[in-house]
Amino acid sequence: MLLSECTAAQAFSSPPPMSAEPALMSMAVLLAPDEDWALSLLGLVSDSLLDPGRVRRDYHDWLDDPSWSKAELARQALLTGLTGSLWGLDPVLVGFDWRASAEEMHNSLRRIPLSPLAAWDPESTVRYTRSDPDAAAPYLREAARRSREAGMALFRIHIGDSFELGFVRADRGELLLTDAARAGYTAATDHVFELVDG
């Protein structure tokens, strides 16, 4: 991924562990598309920290990894919750392989609730359909620009050889990066949040 084109959460120093729980709660509210989503995510994060055994049992298909600490479970639970898979909802966060084409990204991003890209139909060129991160980079820049014009910021989470994309209000983008770092989403945990430049 082109880190030089993005504002990375790595720029923030690691804060004390005590700040992780409120940071996760703040992220749940920042990223939820509505109040019901926010309440569900807040409950999931809280339960992961207070009763991790029950969360592992209730969502064993997604979150049953006994090696995770409570904090690791809460971080993973928030991201998994945002995919909508736990509750059969449309995703707020969409994931891709590093080779994903711009076409794949756009088809998923436009289906996110309140997506600022829903009405945009990019021209179907070879670059647009090619499975190549360099070919997809111009699309991401344009998607980020259009999102900002609509008052939203496009963010990306690097996770190993894959990544996830989602939207946050443009005026809350820097807060999201700060909260993510405080919550423990860092290079050390192989989860780095950044805003895509456009």
Image (cartoon, grey):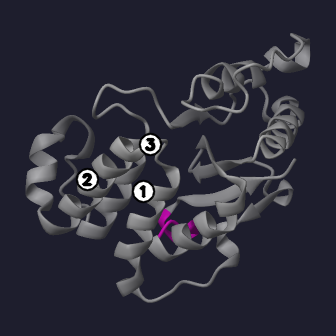
Give me the residue at 60% from left, 73% from top. 178
Badge 2, how many Cα within 10 Å: few under 14, some, many 20+? many
Q: Which type of secondary structure does the marked residue at label 3 adopt?
A: loop
Please report whichever mark, 1 or 3, sits nearer to the chain's N-terminal start: 1
- Residue 85 vertical position relative to residue 153 in the rendered view, above or below: above
103 left or right of 110? right
In the picture of the structure, the residue carrying the numbered disc 3 is: 34
From the viewer's side, name the closer residue of 60 and 92: 92
Give residue 84's quadrant in the image.
top left
Q: Is residue 137 magenta-colored?
A: no
Question: What kind of residue is marked 2?
Answer: Leu
Query: Which of the two labelled residues, at mark 1 and mark 2, occupies the earlier sequence position?
Result: 1
Q: Position of residue 74 (x, y in %)?
A: 31, 60
The amino acid type of the residue labelled 1 equals Ala
Q: CA distance from mark 1 to mark 3?
A: 11 Å
Q: State the residue at coordinates (54%, 83%).
A: 14
Give the mark, 3 or 2, whose residue is nearer the N terminus.
Answer: 3
Circles 3, 2 touching at the beta carbon (< 8 Å): no
* Residue 145 percent location from the top left of the image: 86, 42
Q: Is residue 126 above or below residue 170?
A: above
Q: Which mark is residue 44?
A: 2
88 to the left or right of 111: left
Q: CA distance from mark 3 to mark 2?
A: 16 Å
- Contact flag, marks 1 and 2 (Cβ < 8 Å): yes
Residue 28, which numbered label? 1
Q: Position of residue 11 (x, y in %)?
A: 70, 76
Dot 3 alpha-carbon crowd within 10 angstroms: few under 14, some 14 to 19, many 20 or more: few
- The segment highlighted magenta reads 184-189
- Tell whether 174 sits left or right of 185: right
**Residue 156: image tag:** none
In the image, what residue type sits under mark 3? Asp
